[in-house]
Image: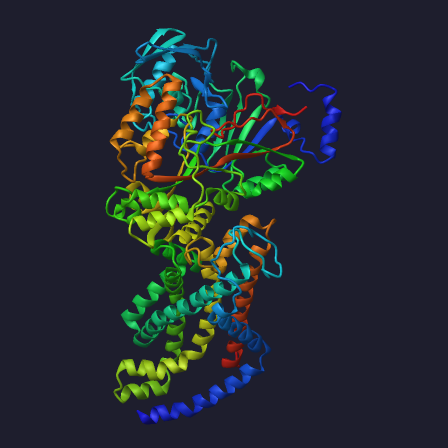
Amino acid sequence: MQVSRSIIPVALAATLLGFSGAAHAQGSNLTVGIQDDPDALDPAVSGTYTGRFVFAALCDKLVDIAPDLTIVPQLATSWTWAPDQKSITFKLRSGVKFHDGTPFDAAAVKFNIERMQTMKDSRRKAELSPVAGVEVVSADEVKFNLKEPFAPLLSVLSDRAGMMVSPAAGAKEDFAVNPVCAGPYKFAERKARDLIRLTKFADYWDAANYGYDQVTYYYIADSTVRLSRVRAGDLMIAERIAPTDLKTVRDDKNLKLHGSPGLAVSHLMVNVGAGEKANTPLGKDARLRKAFELSIDRNVINRVAFNGEYTADNQMIPPSDPYYSKTNPIPARDVAAAKALIAQAGMTTVPVELTYENSLTDGRVAQIVQSMAKEAGFDVKLAPLETTTAIERYLAGNFETYIGNWSGRGDPDPTLYAFFSCNGGQNVNKYCNKELEGVLNQARAEVDIAKRKALYEKATAMYLTDLPTIPIYHPNWFVAARANIAGLNIYPDGLLRLKGVKPAP
Amino acid sequence: MSAVSEERAPSSQRGERAAWRRLLREPAAIIGGVIVGGFVLIAIFAPVIAPYDPNASDWMTIREAPSLAHLFGTDDLGRDVLSRVIFGARASLAAGFLSVTIALAIGLPLGVAAGYFGGVTDMAIARIADALLACPFLVLAIALAAFLGPSLQNAMIAIGVSATPIFIRLARGQTLAVRAEDYISAAQSLGLPHAKIMASHILPNILPPIVVQATLTTAIAVLAEASLAFLGLGQAPPDPSWGSMLDAARQFLVEAPWMAVWPGLAIVVVVVGFNLLGDALNDSLNPLD
């Protein structure tokens, strides 16, 4: 490592002044606090968000997303859809090597997709199910044959399903213990429930754009603790800072707040068709669900529970998504109209049981909803449950209403199809509208962006009429970093992309 | 039969009067009694004393510092902290008293029976109590409360059951000591039924240490209720409990310290009150200790 003469006095002065000279002093090790301990570090089996967080530095993907959620090249430099949209051909980047020195080529892509489709514990099987087979066209060209046209494929390949691992290492049983990918940083060590250390991969195709020699992710569950460690200079970056802590970050001149609108959504799911618990006034009558929506003020929820730092909204897809419907704005709170709808349904008091995972965030939202809905005539009973029990009940459809938290995706299909198609993976409240399902099917087969957008407009209007779930807000991402880190740019997926990140001059 | 009880009664009454006199001379007893009595009154008359509905939110006064309108400030949902502390006394004291009542109701008969009968009965009861005691009190209470589901009632049951072995053990030990007394042998030789002997002759004579222990355990139970509520295993929202108020407050320790200070102070004062009272009772009931 070179240290120019002019930097030494600056670094010394910075240290003396109490700035964290850590970036220089620690051999440019970037320390990052993450909220959960990632599960297996294998893109084929990983199921945690923080796993993706680490993969962002460890494993490159065929394609990536841009901040505006459009698809941009990563390991694939370009792609073309076949005229019948039943296949897509990728041109691969040349000169790319895996961390073990194995060259990256079309055969490696074929190996990876087949590995994820066939491996016993693979969690990518459903995402890759539209792929019928992968053909090696040449060393740097690979063709995906699809069972039917599937527009969200590129979005699928911008996440774990598109992460390429070394075929030599991927064939081994213990891959997750010693992952070998093609990202800018390679795996160095992991201490369970403590840290994961990566070191810079010198042969990375874009190595010049990565400013730290090492990245260490520390598992620190509590967001306030993560923040105080960044404030103390003991960590350099902390992800997922609580909205109520943002003032602290903004007021601290040694820190800089980074953020992005998020893809996630928090919504009040109503059981409309799953077993006994669907047999409630709210579950049976869409007018009452509309009344419930009209009785709450999303902006007040956002202001009171999240200091106004999140995005109040009425749709499952966030406003930052290109497919967001602009023709379905948030209805304003209208208690009189809510009361009128309740009267129409022949009721005066509507009992509602609201189940949620016992966290401060959901608890606060639940209490605000309870208090507001009461004015319209809803008697909301709160049922906070310990997380595991709550999720079990959610998956089993054993709830009347539930505060659902969905992480969202870069493409609208995985969200809307999962929640609103009759057999969708997240359709735990058993909502089924064949007409809406038809529109969603058309949309996933439509590659033309304008036409696809029109279909999602239609779908949005339909689910907002039936209201099987009432979206409330979209969380936004907040990352606190030491002010002496330059080039940090958070995307809507909240992940830490290290390209261009370096110690500030 | 009458001979036995007549022999016991006068001395017991004399002892009681002496104990009362000693108790009233203890400053700790006065302070503890005033604190506990005061909070009991606050809990009973909460609806009269509290300036606001403890669950009423005002979205325009979120986390406001103490003022004339809100003496203790407002919380994260715009509710009056003073009113919530006042109503929170209900959850805390109810949990304290009822869970100790549960523990006494189960623990006392089992402990006396174990000490009185000895043998296999003693073996079985004492081993169960030992097994329960092997698990730290709060851990056991948390496990039970999580199993039963979050509510104040379940929290009381969990705390009560967790505190039971303390009373089994104490009652058993005391009974073993009393059982060897002549008046028990006399009662037995008169052919009194076991239940009668245990209730009329053993229980009154082992009560002093039980009363002291019950008072001290109430303090522990109040603290346990706060801990369970802090973890979301107590009083269901939106009804206030000091523990859940602390839980909500911990996110705002810097911006809104009043959210944490008042319920925290209330817990400390009540627990100190019960401990002072317990210590004073101990000194006056067992003057030789």
User: Is A216 left or right of B104, judged from the image as shown?
Assistant: right
- Residue A278: name its quadrant: top left
User: Is B128 left or right of A51, judged from the image as shown?
Assistant: left
Please report the residue visible at 54 percent of the width from the left and 52 percent of the height from the top: B249
User: Is A103 left or right of A216, judged from the image as shown?
Assistant: left
- Residue A453: name its quadrant: top left
Q: Is residue A53 above or below residue B205?
A: above
Q: As rendered, which of B60 and A26 lies closer to the eye?
A: B60
Q: Residue B257 appears at what percent x and percent y?
A: 60, 53
Q: Residue B145 appears at what percent x and percent y?
A: 38, 56
* Residue A413 visible in the displayed image: no
Q: Residue A68 appears at what percent x and percent y?
A: 49, 23
* Residue A221 visible in the displayed image: yes
Quadrant in which the N terminus of chain B appears: bottom left
Q: Residue B106 appears at what percent x and percent y?
A: 34, 70
Q: Is residue B83 above or below residue A378?
A: below
Q: As rendered, which of B81 and B265 lies closer to the eye?
A: B81
Q: Is residue A151 above or below residue A362?
A: above
Please report the residue visible at 38 percent of the width from the left and 68 percent of the height from the top: B103
Please report the residue visible at 45 percent of the width from the left and 46 percent of the height from the top: A365
Numbered label tally: 0
Please report the residue visible at 51 percent of the width from the left and 76 percent of the height from the top: B282
Task: State the colouring used for the structure image.
Answer: rainbow
Q: As rendered, which of A420 and A405 lies closer to the eye?
A: A420
